[in-house]
Amino acid sequence: MNEPIVHRHWLAHLAPKAAPAVATSTVLILGRIWNANGAEHSVGNAALMVVLAAGAATAGAFASAGRRGDSVIAGTAFATSGGLALAGVAGYADGLSLPLLLWALATAIAYGLAARYWRTDRRDTTAHERRTTQRREDHAHVERVEALRAGAQIEVARSGAAYAEQLATALLTRAALPGFDPKALASAGLPELPAAESTKEH
């Protein structure tokens, strides 16, 4: 009934918070590596990244359009478009100032979007925990009521059994007394017991 309480490691709490910065930093590092390997001032490479980024942005726009738009696919497509744009600038530019500026901007946007999902997830988790706690309390209340009812029935049964045992002991003790005469009891006007009736019949 009682579920074990699982404590998550501090790294498990920190990993989602660091994911946007790790992602943008990885793109920046890969872009600078690409820059050092011949992408600096390469128009062909820059054009390729522009086409890829525009294609990803277009896919995101189509995914988010209409009533049945998928926000997950749209968000992924727009994030891919931003990452490609950042990689293209980091690969094409000869200095670090512009890539670092775009990296800071991309990281801020990533954290802004992630914060929205974190709030929603936290709200859903809190609501789920409340529902679970409410169900546990309801079940515990029902169990307590049933336990009390069962205990009362057991006590009633015990008291009935004790009364029957005491009655049987009294009848046996009375019948074993010397000079016991059921007819004398009946003539004295005392109520007859079942044992007296059975004695008359025999």
Image (cartoon, rainbow, N blue to C red):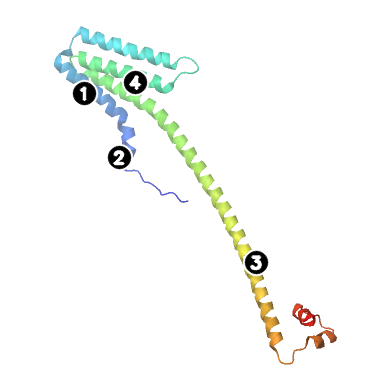
Which mark is first along the chain, 1 or 2?
2
The residue beneath circle 2 is 11
The residue beneath circle 3 is 156
Q: Is residue 3 above or below residue 93?
A: below
- From the top left corner, tell me how far across and down residue 137 is, in percent: 54, 49
The residue beneath circle 4 is 79
Q: Which mark is residue 29?
A: 1
Residue drawn at x 38%, y 25% is 113
Q: Amino acid at mark 2?
A: Leu
Cα separation between marks 3 and 1: 79 Å
Q: Are marks 4 and 3 in contact (CB under 8 Å)?
A: no
- From the top left corner, tell me how far across and down residue 117 is, in percent: 41, 29
Q: Quadrant of residue 14?
A: top left
Cα separation between marks 2 and 3: 58 Å
> Is residue 49 or residue 154 the one in the foreground?
154
Q: Amino acid at mark 4?
A: Ala
Q: Is residue 178 above or below residue 33?
A: below
Near mark 2 (Cα within 10 A), the count class, few <14, some 14-19 or many ≥20, is few
Residue drawn at x 45%, y 31% is 120
Cα separation between marks 4 and 3: 71 Å
Quarter of the picture containing the C terminus is bottom right
Q: Element at badge 1?
A: helix
